[in-house]
């Protein structure tokens, strides 16, 4: 089978790239070793967060925030998005100071989306919060969506634009033959002049095949969800001194994350809960919302993701292979960036450049480290 | 409670009791964890506390549990009642909840003896108050002597329905009708299994006796019932159905339904054991070897949790699993394991004769399994209808987990216990794929409810 662009990975990044390319009349094939959004894309916490981003990500995150506001125009669905704001609370003077420094840094860079609020406004916005907090950093435009609904909307949009999606089709090898990439799979060969690596936790496998391995480390952030509760809180809560992300979803359930990682069984691609660390998340919630003591946890899970040493992704053209591009390593905060990453890749592929600064995300920034081998998922 | 046991047994029904007793006899450290207040499981519930007259009403199969429970009580196995297991993983770390305190411990070998539960079959009106599972009716009777005084209608299929009707008859409950949904054609399909079933003829004789007792008592049994429907505004008022091509209706405030039993697989699934679809029993069950070993090292399943075999069979399977655990622990050598297994293996084989016949005879219709009525709720926790599931399939989602992601079906507090099998059937029928390929929901812990406060207070010595 033949197309203009071959995309490896049927997650949000892959489908977003396909949608943007197909809107510009480019024929795409998406190859997926599992089913759509099977890993991080389908089961992440759904945070639409500009707050506290790495400075290199801020221009992308701000552009993406604008796209999420009008996501229906892109994929014909609102992806169940809400924008009640996200905030990061301080629980003592030291934490408050670190938040103020962050706010000052952003002001100096010319950004206005993060601002400090005092206790008056904090408790007006979140009356349920325990009384010991000292202030917060807030991004009022932030919010959340439902990841699998977003994934499904991008998938449907891609389909309606003629993108060919192939599930259960692992790419065993890629070869460059006469200005074309040739991907071999159990379902035969797929060809295109351009290859895009959006393989998530498995992306280093592809990067290695292209001769540019990266120090990508697989990890599975754990999450848990509660029974439904009456509505009691709007914004998404994080904390300056804790690994915590806490929100009440549209249906009343609480979604509690916090970047604590599950145990990984790489040979089986299985994750197992680390209850010791999930108990830390539960304790954090108890400290900030002691009234939730008797709320039942209904489910916990972890989605396979991959982290770069500097916790920012790889986005851009291959350094070693012509006509190859990468977008992976989002280090557990890629959901919000997905619409803009697809746009950037489509621009790189069709126009040769993007208007957004992607230099910090180049793939060879850890080339020295990678002389030694790195973890590759099978 | 210790932090580590050589053998942990989960569940105090016939399989768990037999496994724990046998293992303890060989001098190893055994702990048995069970959610109920007393040993016996579902089948021998309240065995130690039940009044004599009520025990007689329950029949002599029930009495058989007495020996099992007292042997267990006399053994050195540590017994933890009212203790829920909320997590089990491939490293055999077991999450427990006892009197509000969450803790974690480990075991070298784990026997899951989680038993069976009644197959949830969604049909129009099944969520109305007043519609209950026959098993729930039986629990109320066994444990508390509570019976529906204003009378009941029983509907469904399978031996337990017949047994409950018989038990109610003896307890003086008015049974307005027994609606048998088993399709007539089953009689034909079950025939090839009959000769072998006659080897375990006592089951068939017993069934015939129940039937004739009911008939003598004037209880009307209507066969080949189709289009079962519970009706009422806020609670059940009547049951309608089609019998002999004619639509009929019965007024009743209580409808007890039963469509056979299926294995409890939450624990074996959350531990990562491989499962397969059993087309004869119409359920998912863990893949087991002749000793009850799963695909995960050190984790065994015994009894109905590994596929429906009944109480007696579970007892034998429990002992076989214990022997395997003892062998793995180095307590028994290969020869001793074989020798001690001989009798249980023989009895278990005898017990299995009746199964193919029963499974074919009581197999419920595809119409019921596939929930043909679009408006019927399949997932009652998240209120997802059969029509919504079929719409998701039409949109290209052809496995259970994709349907779950999209519709939230199975994401409620029951964790899909109530809808998993029905969703497998619906998705398979709508997509034209085999149920095996549709897959089962991935099981997420905790498998039993745990509060945020309980998790925050988790006691676990294991350091990070």
Image: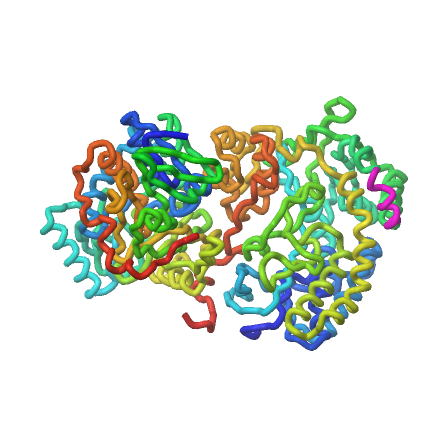
Q: Position of residue B173 (x, y in %)?
A: 79, 44
Residue A234, visible in the rendered structure: no
Q: Look at the image and say whether residue B198 sits in the magenta stretch.
A: yes
Query: Is A111 displayed left or right of A189 in the figure?
Result: left
State which region is magenta. Answer: B192-201
Q: Position of residue A58 (x, y in %)?
A: 19, 47
Which residue is drawn at the image coordinates 50% and 45% (left, top)? B412
Q: Look at the image and say whether residue A293 sits in the magenta stretch.
A: no
Q: Position of residue B372 (x, y in %)?
A: 62, 29
Quadrant location of the C terminus of chain B?
Answer: bottom left
Quadrant location of the N terminus of chain B?
Answer: bottom right
**Please, what is the dominant secondary structure of the magenta stretch?**
helix
Frontmost residue, B303 versus A201: A201
Frontmost residue, A33 versus A155: A33
Examine the rendered structure and indicate whether residue A166 appears above or below residue B245: below
Which residue is drawn at the image coordinates 43% and 39% (left, top)? A184
Frontmost residue, A195 versus A24: A195
């Amino acid at each position: 089978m033949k197309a203009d662009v071959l995309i490896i990975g049927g997650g949000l990044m892959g489908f977003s790239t396909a949608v943007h390319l197909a809107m510009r009349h480019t024929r795409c094939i998406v190859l997926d070793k599992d089913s759509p959004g099977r890993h991080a894309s389908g089961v992440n916490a759904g945070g639409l967060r500009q707050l506290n981003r790495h400075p290199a990500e801020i221009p992308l995150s701000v552009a993406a925030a604008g796209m999420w506001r009008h996501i229906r125009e892109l994929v014909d669905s609102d992806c169940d998005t809400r924008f009640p704001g996200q905030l990061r609370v301080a629980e003592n003077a030291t934490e408050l100071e670190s938040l103020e420094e962050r706010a000052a840094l952003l002001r100096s860079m010319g950004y206005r989306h993060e601002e400090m609020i005092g206790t008056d406004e904090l408790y007006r916005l979140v009356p349920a919060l325990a009384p010991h907090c000292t202030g917060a950093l807030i991004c009022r435009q932030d919010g959340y969506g439902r990841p699998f609904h977003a994934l499904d909307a991008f998938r449907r949009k891609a389909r309606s634009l003629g993108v060919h999606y192939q599930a259960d089709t692992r790419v065993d090898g890629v070869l460059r033959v006469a200005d074309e990439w040739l991907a071999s799979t159990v379902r035969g060969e797929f060809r295109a002049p351009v290859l895009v690596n959006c393989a998530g936790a498995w992306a280093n496998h592809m990067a290695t095949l292209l001769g540019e391995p990266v120090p990508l480390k697989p990890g599975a952030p754990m999450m848990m969800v509660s029974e439904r509760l009456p509505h009691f809180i709007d914004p998404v809560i994080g904390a300056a001194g804790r690994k915590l992300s806490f929100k009440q979803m549209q249906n009343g359930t609480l979604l509690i994350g916090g970047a604590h990682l599950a145990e990984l069984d790489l040979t089986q691609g299985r994750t197992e809960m680390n209850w010791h660390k999930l108990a830390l998340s539960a304790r954090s919630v108890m400290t900030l919302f002691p009234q939730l003591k008797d709320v039942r946890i209904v489910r916990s899970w972890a989605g396979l993701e991959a982290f770069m040493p500097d916790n920012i992704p790889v986005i851009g053209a291959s350094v070693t292979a012509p006509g190859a591009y990468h977008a992976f390593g989002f280090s557990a905060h890629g959901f919000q960036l997905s619409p803009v990453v697809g746009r950037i890749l489509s621009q790189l592929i069709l126009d040769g450049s993007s208007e957004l600064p992607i230099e910090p995300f180049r793939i060879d920034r850890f080339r020295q480290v990678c002389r030694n081998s790195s973890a590759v998922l099978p | 409670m210790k932090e580590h046991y050589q053998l942990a047994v989960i569940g105090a029904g016939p399989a768990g009791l037999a496994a724990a007793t046998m293992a303890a006899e060989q001098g190893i450290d055994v702990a048995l964890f069970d959610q109920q207040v007393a040993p016996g499981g579902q089948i021998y519930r309240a065995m130690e506390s039940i009044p004599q007259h009520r025990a007689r009403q329950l029949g002599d199969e029930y009495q058989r549990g007495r020996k099992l429970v007292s042997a267990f009580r006399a053994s050195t196995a540590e017994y933890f009642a009212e203790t829920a297991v909320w997590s089990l993983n491939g490293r055999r770390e077991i999450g427990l909840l006892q009197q509000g305190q969450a803790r974690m411990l480990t075991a070298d070998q784990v026997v899951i003896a989680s038993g069976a539960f009644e197959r949830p079959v969604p049909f129009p009106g099944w969520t109305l108050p007043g519609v209950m599972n026959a098993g729930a009716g039986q629990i109320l009777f066994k444990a508390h002597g509570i019976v529906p005084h204003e009378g009941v209608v029983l509907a469904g299929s399978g031996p337990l329905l017949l047994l409950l009707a018989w038990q109610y008859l003896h307890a003086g409950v008015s049974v307005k009708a027994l609606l048998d949904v088993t399709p007539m054609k089953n009689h034909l399909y079950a025939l090839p299994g009959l000769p072998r079933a006659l080897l375990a003829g006592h089951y068939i004789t017993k069934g015939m006796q129940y039937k004739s007792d009911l008939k003598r008592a004037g209880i009307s049994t209507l066969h080949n019932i189709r289009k079962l429907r519970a009706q009422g505004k806020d609670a059940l008022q009547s049951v309608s159905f089609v019998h002999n091509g004619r639509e009929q209706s019965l007024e009743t405030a209580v409808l007890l339904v039963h469509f056979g039993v299926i294995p409890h697989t939450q624990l074996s699934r959350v531990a990562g054991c491989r499962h397969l679809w059993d087309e004869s029993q119409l359920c998912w069950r863990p893949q087991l070897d002749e000793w009850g070993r799963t695909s995960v090292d050190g984790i065994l399943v015994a009894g109905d949790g590994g596929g429906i075999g009944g109480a007696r069979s579970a007892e034998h399977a429990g002992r076989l699993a214990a022997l395997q655990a003892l062998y793995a622990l180095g307590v028994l050598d290969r020869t001793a394991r074989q020798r001690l297994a001989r009798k249980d293996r023989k009895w278990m084989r005898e017990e299995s004769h009746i199964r193919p016949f029963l499974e074919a005879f009581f197999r419920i219709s595809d119409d019921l399994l596939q929930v043909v009525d679009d408006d019927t709720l399949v997932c009652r926790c998240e209120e997802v209808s059969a029509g919504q599931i079929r719409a998701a399939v039409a949109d290209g989602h052809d496995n259970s987990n994709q349907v779950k992601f999209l519709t939230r079906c199975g994401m409620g507090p029951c964790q899909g216990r109530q809808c998993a099998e029905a969703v497998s059937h619906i998705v398979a029928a709508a997509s034209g794929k085999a149920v095996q390929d549709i897959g089962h929901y991935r099981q997420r812990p905790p498998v039993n409810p745990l509060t945020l406060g309980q998790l925050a207070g988790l006691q676990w010595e294991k350091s990070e």
